[in-house]
Amino acid sequence: MAVLLELVNISKYFGNVTALEGISTTVEAGRVTCVLGDNGAGKSTFIKILSGLYEPSEGEYLVDGTPVKFASPRDARASGIATVYQDLAMAPLMSVWRNFFLGSEPGAGGWFDTTFAKHTAKDELKKMGIDIRDIDQPVGTLSGGERQSVAIARAVYFGARVLILDEPTSALGVRQSGVVLKYIKVAAERGLGVIFITHNPHHAYPVGDRFLLLNRGHSMGDFAKEDIELDELTRMMAGGAELRALQHELGVR
Amino acid sequence: MSSTDAPAPHAASDERIAFRGPLQRLLISPEIGALIGAVMVWTLFWAVGSEFSTASATALWLDSAAPLGIMAVAVALLMIGGEFDLSSGVITGSMGIFVGIFAQRFMGDGASMYLAVPAAFLVAGLIGWLNGTLVVRTGLPSFIVTLATFFVLQGANLVFSKRLVNKVIVENINAERIKDFKPFETVFAGKFKREPPGFADQLFLGLVLLAALLVVFALLEQSLVRRQAAHSRALVLLLGGAFAAAAGLVLLHTTDGVGANWLCSILGLGGAAVGTVGFASWRYETTAPDGAWLAPSVRVPLVGGVGALVAGWAITRKLDMEQRREILSIPSQGVKVAIGVAAAALGFGVALHLGLRRVRNQASGRRQSQFAVPRVVLIALLAGLVSTVGVVALLQLTTEQGFRAGLFVGFGVGGVLAILVAKGRARSRSRRCQLLVGLIAASAVVFLAVLVRYDSGSHRFRGGLVGALAIAAAAIVANALVEAVGTKRHAFDRAADTRGRVVGFIGLLLIFLAFVLRIAFSGSNVRTSILWWLIITGVAAFVLARTRWGNWIFAVGGNKDAARAVGVPVDQVKVGLFMMVSLVGCFVGMLTVLRYNSVPAGSGVGKEFEFIIAAVVGGCLLTGGYGSVIGASFGAMIAAMPVNGINYAGWNSDNKMIFLGVVLFLAVLVNQKIRKKAQEAR
């Protein structure tokens, strides 16, 4: 498998605060790399470095084997790295197709080819296995899972090779999360490298091929799926010793 | 890829949603509430003072609506983009003053208009740029920033006109005092000449007819299943019906007189219905309508509605509309007050009684408690207030004309509502019943058209109105046929949908064109400003719906951060919108200054709220991200009609603002209800 992204010893400092230190991982085409960590583990900083919002203070960021320095998210998008944020980056009162093509409207010289836009949006969503009831309905009337799916389909259509998903399942119920996990798998099967950021190992384990665990800005390991079990993942996520102390405190025997 | 290409076109349909026909799609657009509101306000004033519908009166109220409408369009765009501009009113005055002083005083003896007008636009653009840049850079609410601009401009108007012309009004902005004034006057404030009747009228009739045909075709094409082989016998029906319809309409347009009107209308409508049936069965799959013609639950509202319309018409015929004598004159103020108080007490008492009974019923456990006693008292108080207002209004209206208006509007609205109820009920009954009710509803529209036709002063204006209502009737008939006779298409058919949409668009364009021509060539007082209004609304609607900038405007107002994240130049869009509002404000300033030849220093102050109100009535959300410029234009009509209508109604014009307030509130309320209902129907 082709390695799309490679991070070598990435660190980020804000003044005397260490946000990230010595993080390394790889993202391969057709694979899902999960980034796991509790609140304050440095996940957000990590995403912002990946998507070009921050420059790393130390370390190397390689795309297709060549080191890069992104000045803005626009640069990252130009190299095919698309980020789907938690807040979904959509206008709730606009229709699905208007949102789908927002910022990249088809048509020459300012003209917006709405017929093309409607049909393409419908077809692209179908390709991802998403069956929107009505392409004209406002995005605000979609469920959370559907909205995530539209955002993913949009990133895929606009030529993303690497898809960064920021906590796509955190605000969703069990069934909706399942839907989103399915689309993550579909995206990977279509040859994209996916970075799936979450704090839920139960969501990460079924779809992930590689797991990067973060804790307080440090890496707790970068594992391939065959090297780690779900129980182990959960235990490390919960912070092992800390959880045992907590159990003691709560009086659980 | 092969697996995704496999599904047939029909698989694109979705069993979870019922197919939404073109009429339903029309109903969920934001401007429809404003359109209904505008029609209602127009009907009210027409009913109260029938001169209101004459060509010269129409020219008059459109003349005052045009500047308001042009600005409302600009303000609506800005509002959709999520911002306000409180300086949008005063800037019209500022730019008028600027041009007036510049053209009179620049370099001693004044500048040519060719210099003054572009200079004004330049200054307006700068003010808009400043507004936008300040809002974007400081992050302060646009409400505050533009309020500051508003005060600054208001002050500047006063300072400059006092210092430079020693008055609080800039006068004599005319051809004698200013160089190159004439060409600008023609463009901004010219009048259209009245042509002798003839070609323009024929052209109008032809265009309207063609448009009606195209609209009906578009409706059918988008809703029905195509027949495999053409049904040739239906052609006879089609041709016969078409001939009768054409004959009816031509006669209607050329002859005058009550009996002839009726006959021609019946001929026209019947012919159109037969022709449409013929066309529908020639081109599309049909099913014979089945079931009972009239279900009992439909019969009552239908007969009631038709009866009410006829009764309203008969009663209003008996009352002379020219009579303004009071038929219920009450001599003393004391008696009037006493009547008002009595009405309040009665309303309060009845509402309280009903409410309390309801609370008692709930207490006995028959229903979940929704009504608490304080709420009942509140509602009762409101009822008291409403009944006082109603009685006082009635006392105001008690000229014979007012009485007639009350009766006509009461019967008319009641009749239409009843027929609508019947139509709603017919939907769930047999197809035959649906067809019948649809045809009767269309007849009611034509009935109203004929009524308007011979109740108003101008022959040509009546022609235009009949044309408009005939199109509405044609659309209702086509819809009834789709519901009752045709086999409804539930699948998505790209070719047919595109065809239908294109043809429908051409039809609507023709209607638009026909009325532009009518306005341009018929009015005794019609000014260029109305043409400008139409053009600006059209351009703005196109930009909003069919260009990337339109998409950006929606997104910037709907979710700024999202728009920025996908690469929309948010700040540029906002600054551009502010500049656009200021430039349009300057344009309106030119319209006013060239029309009235003088500008008081306070010109335009306070107008900004009218613009905002027109936009909101037109369906724009105050919070941004949603709205329509066509709706804003209708909103401007709603705001402008009472100003002139009150004079024609013979009411005390001091009541103007009260009326405006109530109408605007009701319009927004109706709009909101309709939008909610339409959203639920999705």
Image: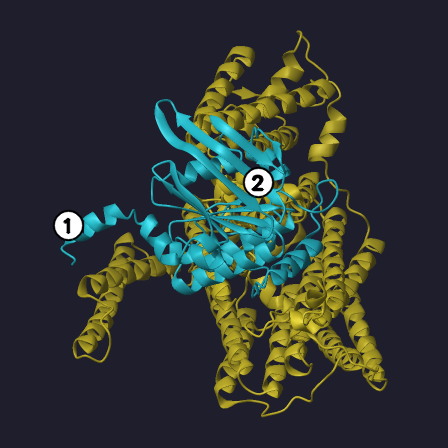
Corner quadrant of residue B76: top right
Residue B90 shows in this picture: no
**A102 lies above or below B387:** above
**Which chain is the one coloured yellow?**
B
Q: Quadrant of residue B115?
A: top right
Q: Relative to the observer, which residue lies in front, B116 or B164?
A: B116
As helix, strand or loop, the secondary structure at mark 2 comes to strand
Q: Can residue B480 be seen in this view?
A: yes
Q: Which chain carries label 1?
A: A
Q: Residues within 10 Å of mark 2 (few under 14, many from 20)?
A: many
Q: Name the residue under label 2.
A: A5
**Does residue A47 sit above or below B668 in this rendering?**
above
Which one is nearer the viewer's eye here, B620 or A215?
A215
Question: In the rendered image, which quarter contains the N terminus of chain B?
Answer: bottom right
The three-letter code of the residue at mark 2 reads Leu
For the residues labelled 1 and 2, the Cα–Cα distance comes to: 42 Å
Q: Mark 2 lies on which chain?
A: A
Q: Evaluate if marks 1 and 2 touch, with contact meaning CB atoms under 8 Å apart.
A: no
Name the spot of residue B351 as percent of width and height, x first. Answer: 25, 68
Circle 1 Cα neighbour tier, 10 Å, few/some/many (<14 / 14–19 / ≥20) = few
**Which chain is cyan in the rendering?**
A
Element type at marker 1? Answer: helix
Circle 1 residue: A249
Q: Is residue A33 left or right of residue B480?
A: left
Q: Which of B412 and A237 is in front in this view?
A: A237
